[in-house]
Image (cartoon, helix red, strand yellow):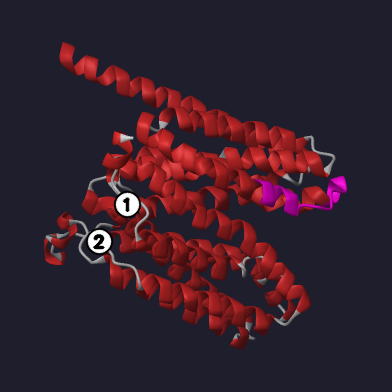
């Protein structure tokens, strides 16, 4: 009991408001992911232009993050968080008036810039309000706002798109975005002393330097590889369900969300007590098994089981890898590291779509999942090699 009272407080008003505000940011945004392609098709877009809906967004998000990471080295958090949330809200309400495909795609690119801005600064602000001794646990909880948004919002968006107009869908998305702005405005932000003491004129901006944080690049590199494996699922699971006659695809996402929600607090505490390595091994292994279970799924039960394994594996892997990245990063460089981490997710899933979209021409979807599991083996092998390297290096330095 004594140890319990010595713990630094995690559940502050600011942490709760920031977490819930981030949930509404993700809800507002993710509702549009599955609905924008059919909308742009309805206004006359070609197949290539439909593909650009995702591509331009991803490009915008990756391009902006180094600049935001640089700004986070010397700017206070509050203004950056609120600017990002407001821009997302404004861009969202512009979609219904963009009946020209080129203008729609331009708005989509700007939306990607705003998304890259918001995800980077929100995650960095969360790290600043979480006690460092409970970083893994805190980021695990904060990551739930991302996971729940990813899982619930696309289904909600599809439902609204089917039963009402696109304009009404945008209105609801805009309301969620407005709520996020209000909640984020109530947060008492903490800017690290190292950032407050840093002046812009004393910093030299390097795009590559703000794209990659050298002190913590490795966990983000592993994130790219894991997302290369996961990307096949996010791209092809609906098609796979149609091929197998599995009509309850939502079970995969529901079990994913339930298990991830239940497991993340334990994963975070494990990280704080014992470090990231064992948890990374476990998460990758669970995701690997989930891919193979999914590849043999013939029933809704098997699909749900695969979803649960993904919640246990991939659902816990991302906050663990993010916490690992941030724990290795100096306070004043956390914005850069956070941007690097989220860009790793975008890059991994984006490349996966290209890779497995090409392979899909030569094999069935079940084999795609099995082939994508090779990336998870690569991730484990590279992590083992990195751990051995870190253990050997100090001894070598002592001998020399």
Looking at the image, residue 382 sits to the left or right of residue 169; the answer is: left
Asked if residue 362 shows in the view, the reply is no
Q: Quadrant location of the N terminus?
A: top left
- Which residue shows up at 49% across the image and 50% down it? 345
Q: Quadrant of residue 13?
A: bottom left
Residue at x 54%, y 84% (from the top left corner): 94
**Vertical side of 240 occupied by 57: above or below:** below
Magenta stretch, residue numbers: 242-255
> Label 2: few (<14), some or many (≥20) within 10 Å?
some
Circle 1 packing at 10 Å, graded few (<14), some (14-19), many (20+), is many
**Rendered view: 392 above or below 37:** above
What mark, if any, has residue 130 been given in the picture?
1
Horizontal side of residue 66 vs 351, given as left or right: left
Q: Which residue is mark 2?
A: 190
In the depicted view, which residue is nearer to us: 293 or 65?
293
Up the image or down, 190 lies above or below 314; here it is below
Q: Residue furthest top?
A: 399
Q: Position of residue 195 (x, y in %)?
A: 18, 59
The furthest residue to the right:
245
Instruction: Report helix, strand or loop for mark 1.
Output: loop
Considering the whole magenta stretch, tell me its main secondary structure. Answer: helix
Q: CA distance from mark 1 to mark 2?
A: 10 Å
Secondary structure under tag 2 reads loop
Q: Quadrant of the C terminus?
A: top left
Whether the magenta-drawn stretch holds residue 351 is answered as no
**218 w.r.t. 203: above or below:** above
Picture residue at 39% right of the left edge, 70% below the top: 184
């Amino acid at each position: 009991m004594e140890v319990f009272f010595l713990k630094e407080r995690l559940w502050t008003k600011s942490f709760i408001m920031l977490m819930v505000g981030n949930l509404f940011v993700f809800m507002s945004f993710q509702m549009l992911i599955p609905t924008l392609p059919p909308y742009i098709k309805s206004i006359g877009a070609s197949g290539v232009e439909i593909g650009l809906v995702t591509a331009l967004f991803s490009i915008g998000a990756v391009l902006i993050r180094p600049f935001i990471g640089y700004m986070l080295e010397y700017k206070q958090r509050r203004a950056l968080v609120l600017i990002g949330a407001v821009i997302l809200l404004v861009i969202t309400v512009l979609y219904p008036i963009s009946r020209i495909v080129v203008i729609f795609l331009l708005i989509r690119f700007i939306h990607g810039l705003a998304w890259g801005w918001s995800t980077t600064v929100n995650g960095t602000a969360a790290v600043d309000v979480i006690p460092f001794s409970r970083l893994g646990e805190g980021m695990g909880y904060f990551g739930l706002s991302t996971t729940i948004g990813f899982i619930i919002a696309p289904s909600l968006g599809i439902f609204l798109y089917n039963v009402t107009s696109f304009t009404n869908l945008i209105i609801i998305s805009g309301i969620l975005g407005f709520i996020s702005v209000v909640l984020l405005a109530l947060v008492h932000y903490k800017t690290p002393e190292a950032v407050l003491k840093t002046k812009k004129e004393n910093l030299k901006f390097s795009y590559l330097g703000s794209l990659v944080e050298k002190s913590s690049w490795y966990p983000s590199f592993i994130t790219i590889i894991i997302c290369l494996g996961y990307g096949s699922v996010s791209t092809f699971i609906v098609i796979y369900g149609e091929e197998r006659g599995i009509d309850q695809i939502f079970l995969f996402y529901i079990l994913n969300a339930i298990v991830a929600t239940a497991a993340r607090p334990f994963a975070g505490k494990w990280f704080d007590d014992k470090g990231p390595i064992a948890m990374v091994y476990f998460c990758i292994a669970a995701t690997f098994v989930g891919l193979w279970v999914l590849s043999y799924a013939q029933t809704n039960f098997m699909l749900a089981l695969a979803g649960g394994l993904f919640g246990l594996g991939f659902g816990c892997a991302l906050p663990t890898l993010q916490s690992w990245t941030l724990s290795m990063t100096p306070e004043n460089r956390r914005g850069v590291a956070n941007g690097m981490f989220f860009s790793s997710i975008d890059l991994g899933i984006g490349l996966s779509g290209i890779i497995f979209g090409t392979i899909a021409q030569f094999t069935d979807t079940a084999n795609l999942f099995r082939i994508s599991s090779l990336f998870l083996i690569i991730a484990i092998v590279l992590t083992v090699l990195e751990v051995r390297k870190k253990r050997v290096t100090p001894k070598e330095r002592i001998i020399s």
